[in-house]
Image (cartoon, rainbow, N blue to C red):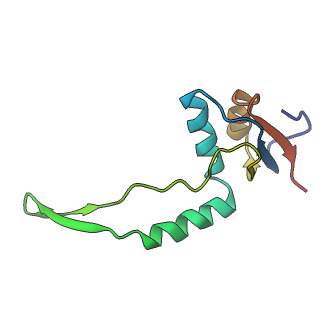
Amino acid sequence: MATEVKPGQWVNVKVVSRPRAAARIKTLTRLFMQDPAVKKERARKSKSRPIGEHRRGGRMWKDRPIQLASAPITPGATYRIFASVDVLKDLKSVASNVEVTPAQ
């Protein structure tokens, strides 16, 4: 991980290799969901998924479809994330799989 990255700035995160551990994949997925482009894509996808309803116990229940993946973790994929203290801590835990550089 780049040492010149400080909390409070934007960073580019490039996936160098796909992690094997499920916990690392989950961490990267959660971090990449913070990218503004990914947020916009998730909002667009959520509008297109229908929310069904059914009656259960005299009340209406909503059937929400599962969230579709918007941030694939493939080698070469690049995401732009705001580097807060907790984000930098998470990026340090997956440093062997990502390359972090300050955004211009």
Work out whether residue 103 can be spotted.
yes
Q: Quadrant of the C terminus?
A: bottom right
Q: Relative to 55, is 87 on the left or the right?
A: right
Q: Position of residue 78 (x, y in %)?
A: 76, 51
Q: Quadrant of the N terminus?
A: top right
Residue at position x 76%, y 30% in the image: 95
Q: Position of residue 38 (x, y in %)?
A: 63, 60
Q: Position of residue 16 (x, y in %)?
A: 77, 38
Q: Residue farthest to the left?
A: 58
Residue at position x 87%, y 44% in the image: 101
Question: Residue 87 appears in which quarter of the rendering?
Answer: top right
Q: Relative to 68, is 55 on the left or the right?
A: left
Question: Residue 73 appears in which quarter of the rendering?
Answer: top right
Q: Relative to 80, is 53 on the left or the right?
A: left
Question: Residue 26 appears in which quarter of the rendering?
Answer: top right
Residue at position x 73%, y 44% in the image: 84
Work out whether residue 8 can be spotted.
no
Q: Position of residue 53 (x, y in %)?
A: 22, 67
Q: Is residue 25 above or below residue 67?
A: above
Q: Nearer the viewer, residue 23 or 84?
A: 23
> How many tags in the picture?
0
Residue at position x 70%, y 28% in the image: 93
